[in-house]
Structures are given as structure tokens and as C-alpha cells.
Amino acid sequence: MPEPDPPQPESGVHTWTGRSRRWFLKHLPPEKLLPEDQPSYVASWAYVFGMGAVAGLVFIIASGVVLSLNGPQWYHISSLGHFTNSVHLWSVELFFMFTVVHLWIKFWMAAWRGGRVLTWITGMLAFLVSVVTAFTGYLLQTNFDSQWIAFQAKDALNAVGVGAWFNVANLGQIFMWHIMLLPLAVGAVVALHVLLVRAHGVVPPLDAADTDAQLQTSAPSASDKEGKLP
């Protein structure tokens, strides 16, 4: 009989792309990244507000792109600009409302349990970066209120030594912070947060009997049962 072929070494062992692929497949397999179902305890209002914040962020980015392409003159004078500006404003309001409620609920649920510390940290970091982003957006209203707040904030930022590179009195610089740098930071942190939620699963309630059992085990399918011998 012919001898069996010797085992072939796994491809990509010595490349960073191969190691990255194996790491992602280990920690984020397709069934976790795009799950078909969720544990039964997810059918609760406590798990709705996080997705509400993500939906609000989508509307913020979409309306913000339209506003940035047309400029301040458009959303100060045009009726369509007023409407788009209002959509942007109320999307921000809903985003912060959902985010704050989401953070409070997860705090009282001790959402850092089960190795989810980094998930909790990225959620808090997303909120903090969003506050700075909203502040720069308030300055872009280019009215008396925004100018007053800008020069009050300029004194505070100069006092802590960051006014040289974060000049809130420079409208062009603030415009770039608001439409490019800070949204990229918010999007990156939120994306990392969602990936961590997929990797570790949603945090179960404190009174759950089997915390992560529904995520770790699944009932065998009918095809699996038919293929097994008694």
C-alpha cells in the first residue's frame, strides 16, 4: 500500500497576515460575528439602548456628511439646510440619551463581568470622545452663543496647555476636528466595542442561573441527529 503523504505545515505560520487570520477566526468566528440568534434574556428593554445609540450615530454621520459638503451658509439660509441641521441635532440628542441610559444599565448590571473589562472601557471611551465631538459641533453653529462659548473655552484650554493645537477660536481647525478627526475616533472606538460584544457575547443578567451557557452551547440540529448512530 502506498504510504500516506506527510503532514503539511500550516500555511501562514510565519507571516503576520496568517497569524492575524488565525487570531480573528479563533476569537471572531462567523457564528459569533454574524449570529443568527441571541440568548433568551436579550428579549428585554435593557438590551435595546445600545443598538439605539448605534442607529443614532448612523443618522449623525449621514446628516453630517450633507451639512459638511454644503457648508455653514447653506444650513443657515436654506430651508432644506435647516431641516438637515435639525435632523443632525436631534440625532445627536437621541444618541446621547440612548448612550447614557445604556451606560447606566450596564453599570448596574456589572457589565465588566466574564472578561468584558475592555468592552466596558471602550464603551466609556466612546462616550467621552463623543462629548468632545459634540462640543466642536456646537462651536460650528457660528452664532453668538457658539462664539461666546468658544472664547470662554479658549481661556480654559490655554490654561491647561493645549490651546496651541486645539484652537477653538479657529473655525477652520474646529471644522476639521468635527468632520474628520473626532468622527474617525468615535467610529473606531464604537466598532471595537461592537466587535468585543460579539467576541464575548452580551452580558447576562445578574440573576441568570447559567450566565453564558446559551452562548457556549447549542442543541444539535436534526441533520446531526440523523447522522449519529445509536
Image: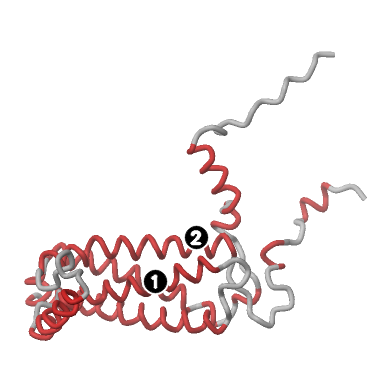
Q: How many marks?
A: 2
Q: Are marks 2 and 1 in contact (CB under 8 Å)?
A: no
The amino acid pointed to by label 1 is: Ala
In the rendered view of the protein, which quadrant contains the N terminus?
top right
Q: Choose top left, top right, bottom left or bottom right for residue 86.
A: bottom left
The amino acid type, in three-letter code, at marker 2 is Leu
Instruction: Name the mark nearer the viewer: 2 or 1.
Output: 2
Percent x, y for residue 137? 21, 74
Please report the residue visible at 39 percent of the width from the left and 70 percent of the height from the top.
126
Mark 2 to mark 1: distance in Å? 16 Å
Q: Is residue 26 left or right of residue 155?
A: right
Above or below residue 3? Residue 125 is below
Residue 55, disc: 1
Left/right of residue 3 with respect to residue 20 in the rendered view: right
The answer to which of marks 2 and 1 sits earlier in the sequence is 1
Whether residue 192 sits left or right of residue 25 in the image: it is left
Residue 19 place in picture, x, y as percent: 54, 40
Q: Please tell me which residue is depicted at 34% across the width and 68% down the height of the picture.
A: 58
Q: Nearer the viewer, residue 74 or 14?
A: 14
Circle 1 sits in a helix, a strand or a loop, which is it?
helix
Q: For residue 147, which quarter of the picture?
A: bottom left
x 60%, y 55%: residue: 31
Q: Position of residue 136 (x, y in %)?
A: 21, 73
The residue carrying pointer 2 sits among few (fewer than 14), some (14 to 19) or many (20 or more) residues within 10 Å by Cα, namely some
Residue 113, percent from left and from top:
61, 72
At horizontal 35% and vertical 70% (from top left) the residue drawn is 57
Tell me the residue that label 2 is attached to.
195
In the displayed structure, does residue 230 sit left or right of residue 140? right
Q: Residues within 10 Å of mark 1 (few under 14, many from 20)?
A: some
Find numbered disc 2 in the image and state the secondary structure of the residue it sits on: helix
Q: Which mark is residue 88?
A: none
